[in-house]
Structures are given as C-alpha cells and as structure tokens.
Image (cartoon, rainbow, N blue to C red):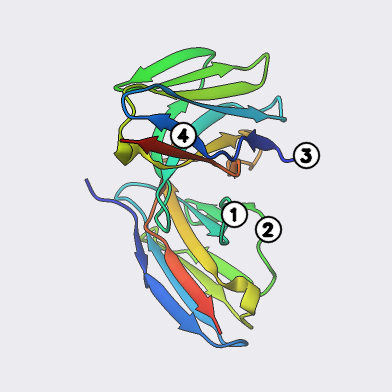
Amino acid sequence: QKEVEQNSGPLSVPEGAIASLNCTYSDRGSQSFFWYRQYSGKSPELIMFIYSNGDKEDGRFTAQLNKASQYVSLLIRDSQPSDSATYLCAVKVSGGSNYKLTFGKGTLLTVNP
Amino acid sequence: AAGVIQSPRHLIKEKRETATLKCYPIPRHDTVYWYQQGPGQDPQFLISFYEKMQSDKGSIPDRFSAQQFSDYHSELNMSSLELGDSALYFCASSLGLRNEQFFGPGTRLTVL
C-alpha cells in the first residue's frame, strides 16, 4: 500500500463548480500536509499547506485536515479551466532526519468550460 | 519573487555517460531537495541537504552523488547513465527543514 493515496481521476467538473480532491495517508507520524498543482511537463507548484486539524482557506482554495481519520482534502471553489491540472498531495513525516515529501500519484482535474 | 533555478533545462546523454545537474535555491534558503519524476509517476525523493550537510537520503542509486556548496547551490552528479534514468529531475528549496518546499522548473534528462 502506498503511503499516500489519491484517486487518480480524471475528475471532471464544469466551470464554476466546486472541485473536491481527497487524499489519505498511512503514517500517523505525519505532521505537515501539502497540495501541489502540476501542469503537464511542468514543476509542482505549492497551492496550500496545512499543519493543524480543521480548515484553512486561501482565496478559492480550502484545505481540510483530519488527523484522526488520516485524511486531507482540497476544495477548489468557482473552478476555472485554468485549474485543469494534476493535483499532488504530499505529506511530510517530520522528525529525526526525515523531512522529505512523500507524494501521492496525483489526481487529474479537468474543468470544462 | 526569485525562484529556484535549475540548469540545464534539457539534457541529452548516451548510455554510460555522466551528467551534472545544478540547482540554485531561492535566496536565503538553506535546504535543498532533489526529486526524480518518471513519466506518469509522482516525484520520488532522492536526497536532501541542510546547511551544506546531507540531511536525508532516499531512493538514490549509488551511481548518483550530490553535494551542497558554501553558497547553498547544489549539484547532482550522475554516472554510468542508464535508459531508466530518463526523467524529470526537480530541485526544491526551503528555509530550514520544517518549512514549505518550493520547486524549480526541473531538468529533463533523456538517456539514449
């Protein structure tokens, strides 16, 4: 079982709708959670990060974390065609010398005009 | 704002050749990470450096080595290249080990 699991999609939503992306992780020692957006052939771009249980909002993006359920999600409100990309969930297990990011395989989001 | 710089952006090599990838972190960032991303795959952690010392090691082949220099830039040296080394190589930087990582544009390595 991969340490970070995401639905590969594709997830297709109409323009203006809410896109909901989900991620689960297996290591309870995970402390930091990140969402990256990656366009095809480009580098991952940091969209959101969250460290504490609950919601964190930044513009059209909301990250939600539930450590008890080992679940993190990203909501994109008023989705735009330019949001079409692969969204990577990444987890950091901090402690000792381990500060690397472990990624899920990503969810491909398509926003239809 | 200044971002992570990687060079070269594209590199074509023959099997068994060597390659050197360079990474210049965001100014004031002291931590550098290297990731490899194969086609259709998620980024895989290779190695990281904090304050010029290796801080963590992932699935980096013995044929690869890396270091961080006094100006905090980092180089990934790859020898005896194999076809399977063809991938995107990303460098990311952060301010300290606990903070967010920002990725560079990547180097696309093609081994023929």
Measuring 51% from the left and 84% from the top, which residue is drawn there?
B13
Number of numbered discs: 4
Q: Chain of mark 4?
A: A
Q: Is residue A104 above or below residue B42?
A: above
Question: Residue A38 location in percent, x, y?
Answer: 43, 47
Q: Earlier in the sequence, mark 4 or mark 3?
A: 3
Measuring 30% from the left and 40% from the top, which residue is drawn there?
A82
Q: Quadrant of the C terminus of chain B?
A: bottom right
Q: In the image, which is nearer the foreground, mark 2 or mark 3? A: 3
Whether discs 2 and 4 lie on one chain: the answer is: no
| Residue B59 marker | 2
**Cβ–Cβ under 8 Å for marks 1 and 4:** no
Measuring 55% from the left and 37% from the top, which residue is drawn there?
A90
- Spatial separation of the CA atoms under disc 2 and disc 4: 34 Å
**Residue highlighted by disc 4:** A12
**Residue highlighted by disc 1:** B41
Question: Residue A29 location in percent, x, y?
Answer: 68, 27
Q: Chain of mark 2?
A: B
What's the residue type where badge 2 is placed?
Answer: Ser
Question: Residue A78 location in percent, x, y?
Answer: 31, 23
